[in-house]
Image (spheres, rainbow, N blue to C red):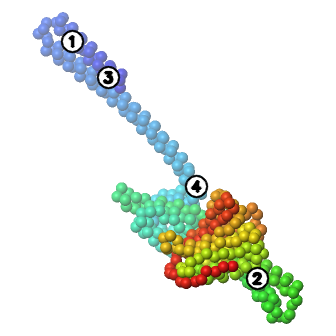
Amino acid sequence: MPNLAKNYILSVISSLVISTSLCFILNFQCTLLILCFIILCCLINTYFVLHISQKQIYKESTERENKLIRQIEYSSNHLTTIINNLPLITYIIDTDCRFITGNSEALKFFGAEDNIEILRYPELVFEKNTLEMIREENKLIIQRKEPFVTDKIVKLKSGRQNWFNIRKVPILNEKNEVKGFVIFGRNIDIEKAAQKQRETYISTLSHDLKIPTLAQIRALELLTKGNLGKINKMQKEIINLTLDSCRYMYDMLSTLLSTYKYENKDISLTFEKIQVMKLMDECFHKFVKSMHNKNIQIKVKAKEKFFTVYADKIQIKKAFENLLDYCISNAYENTEIICDIKKTDNGKNVFLSLGFESPYISSEKIDNLFKRYATAAEKMDKVGSGLGLYLAKQIINAHNGIIYAESKESNYNIYKIELPCINECKIPAMSY
């Protein structure tokens, strides 16, 4: 363009110079003729310049458009390659569940590689219940205008069925109206099969191990009480050791089963009014032998008036027992555990803490303390100790409470629980 403008200006100047020269050479009566000649020259130059510039602009514009088209096609090929090779079924449907487009995995799953048109009729593709479920999901997304995620089994008319983790994303127009859905599906058949194996494993533990262990405990208890005949002191000692081992096995199995149920949200809580001091008293008595073995004393600090909580007694007791068992196991010998029970500053929660002397726990270990199979001890002296605090946290969380720990470099650790309280009742403080 700069060269064209330059040539145009030069041509006009040349025409003016030639016309002026003719004015001097010819008679001035020819002035009108000369002026006409000048105008004609300018018009001719303007025509040629505009014609040439238009052709050049068109050529440059075409080249730019072709280059842009090639870039878009190149990017589109890359995107298509990526989508087609994703280990997901990915496709787009309209609000009537009619197929618009999808990747090769989607076409393969629906069996429509050779006949995509069939996907325009969802009632010919999906089994009736599956299609109804899809439409209900679509209605929910249209109302909320938010992505929807679920795990479900997808059944086709062809008889094929698979478990998928489905993520649906709404497609919105300029009026913020849902006009379609992008669907991503990840096959989770292997995960579901593994879950079924775990359920079989848990059922085996419950029936083949827990029930016989409980039968052994009851039989040994009858022996120690002399209901089946008199036994001497040595026999009673051996039976008591065996009884302790069976009880430990039973507690370990119960912890494992409860952990599984909480993880799979397969637990139902029966809430009732519970006096926390009385419940803690029961928990302390269970560990009298363990405390005596390490010469550990329990000291309870509490006001005369105390608050009760709504909780599942069996479950909340299990949480307290797991925490107390961990504290006794890690506390130094010949020390005491301070149990402080009081009302929190806001007056809405019951605060319970267990403080005792034990090895310092770094902040990194405290962060993992209530996770599965984590322990603050350098070595685990008994099987299953990695699930005790984890299960306690699951139970406390299910009761809308919190549990956490603090550790001081002076080798003093505190484990704290907060639970919603409901009212006050008078219970005398205890000491051990």
* Residue labelled with disc 3: 5
Q: Earlier in the sequence, mark 1 or mark 3?
A: 3
Q: Are marks 2 and 1 in contact (CB under 8 Å)?
A: no
Front: mark 1 or 3: 3
CA distance separating discs 4 and 1: 75 Å
Residue 276, by quadrant, is bottom right
- In the picture of the structure, the residue carrying the numbered disc 1 is 19
SS class, disc 3: helix
Q: Secondary structure at mark 1?
A: helix
Q: Amino acid at mark 2?
A: Thr
Residue type indicated by callout 4: Leu
Q: Is residue 360 visible?
A: yes
Q: CA distance from mark 2 to mark 4?
A: 50 Å
Please identify the quadrant where the C terminus is shown: bottom right
- Check disc 1 and give the amino acid type: Ser
Q: Are marks 2 and 3 in contact (CB under 8 Å)?
A: no
N-terminal label among 2 and 1 = 1
Q: Residue at position x 18%, y 5% from top?
A: 25
Q: Which residue is mark 4?
A: 86
- Out of 281 and 385, give the one closest to the viewer: 281
For the N terminus, the quadrant is top left
Q: Amino acid at mark 3?
A: Ala
Crowding around mark 2 (Cα neighbors within 10 Å: few <14, some 14 to 19, many 20+) is: some
In depth, the one of 132 and 218 nearer the eye is 218
